[in-house]
Image: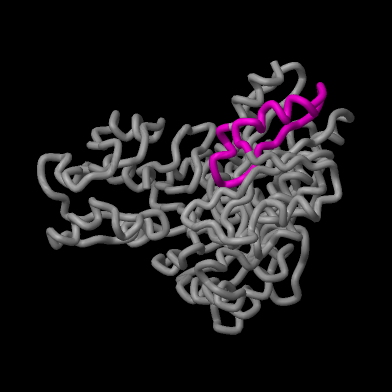
Amino acid sequence: MSGVARILLSRGDIVSGSDMKDSRAVLALRSMGAHIAIGHAAENLELSGELPDVVVISFAAIPQDNPELIAAKAHGIPIVRRSDLLADLMADHTQVLLAGTHGKTSTTSMTVVAMQAAGMDPSFAIGGQLNKAGTNAHHGTGQCFVAEADESDASLLRYSPDIAVVTNIEPDHLDFFKNADAYFKVFDDFADLVGGTLIVCLDDEHATALGERAAQRNIRVVGYGTKDHATIPNRAKVIDIAAERFGSRATFNVDGTTVQADVLVPGEHMVLNGAAAPLAGHLAGGDVEKLAEGLSGFTGVRRRFEHRGTVNDIRVFDDYAHHPTEVEAVLRAARQKIEAEGRGRVVVVFQPHLYSRTAEFAEEFAAALSLADEAIVLDIFGAREQPVDGVTSRLITNAMTIPTTYVVDFSAAPAAVADIVQPGDIVLTMGAGNVTMLADEILNHVS
């Protein structure tokens, strides 16, 4: 929401709104001229001095009994979803949309940084804050608009992409879709909206299958990754991946041009994300060598293997991973970093997100988390869901195969970490809830 507000303000529109608490995002928007109240109330509709022309909401986050939503309905003010407004903002641009179950934010961010380095100055809206730019959105002077296409509530179907990337597909958000078939179908429907080129990761079987089906419907499909395909051309082939202490040094062949880039965020999954960026930028008109050079300048996104600090040679990172596949990828990346350095262990502090997701994937979470050397598992962060009888973090911890501590008291977690970490270790706070708040506290406890 803050990204959309930032773009509207840059275009000269009047923006008002509210949030539950102050934050860096709120302060930044106020500095740009937004009228923002803390706390939700009906009178907030007139923060700017008059009623708004439209009220924008996030489908999942805003309950129907929100007083501002009730007041907007009473005044007959149109209420639209964020995705609808974003689609309007992208009109008259070359639209580059990045979708997939995992890696959307990182891949979108890499694409933006690469295109910026190539002098394309795209407008963009992403689901995280770029470390280098310190922002999640920008109103650019270039022709391209790059955005993350979220499938969690099918809002990706609001867009009309000229270029679309699908990183991978794996059943998730079954609280919304109810079954895996419905989840897969939303990506097929998204592919049908592509007016130019669909780009799929050939290392992912479901993304590849999507590409095969789309090609049969006469949609132009190309691929990227380490693998080749009989009918989908690999236009960004990963030729080599060399693990380094900083991450990976990767060699790509993008449409016949061989380039090298340093991917500063650890993990082979990040190299795959990195391959998509110069390909998408090239198809949008950018120079391959400049795009690859820009990729080397990508320093990450907040809450994606984000280094939060080092104390007494104990390094604390924070990551948004909340699906078993994401957890596995991040822990493998941490292991890669440990092995490249030749020291230390991986200690994970994991907070399950949603009762429905925990119940659905408990065994998969346990297997993924067991890639660490030791784990601390917190209670479930319910977010929009109410507690479910019998669904607790015990479903995960009971199946773990490494030393694991179940910490019920959130505030006790930093001390529990301090009891087990050693110099050289990597500590990863992980999850989509408020576990990110523990990183600084852990640093204090190990000092």
**Image height check: is 160 above or below 137?**
below
Q: Nearer the viewer, residue 444 or 131?
A: 444
Q: Is residue 156 highlighted in magenta?
A: no
Which residue appears farthest toward the bottom when viewing the image?
216
Residue 415: x and y, percent? 69, 26
Q: Residue at x 60, y 71 (%)?
A: 221
- The answer to whether residue 158 is left or right of residue 244 is left
Residue 215: x and y, percent? 60, 79
Q: Nearer the viewer, residue 351 or 240?
A: 351
Q: Is residue 302 visible?
A: yes
Which residue appears farthest toward the right when viewing the image?
342
Residue 49: x and y, percent? 11, 40
Q: Is residue 278 visible?
A: no
Q: Which residues are magenta?
A: 409-437
Q: Quadrant of residue 403?
A: top right
Which residue appears farthest toward the front when viewing the image?
389
| Colouring style | one colour
Q: Is residue 431 highlighted in magenta?
A: yes
- The answer to whether residue 387 is left or right of residue 321 is left
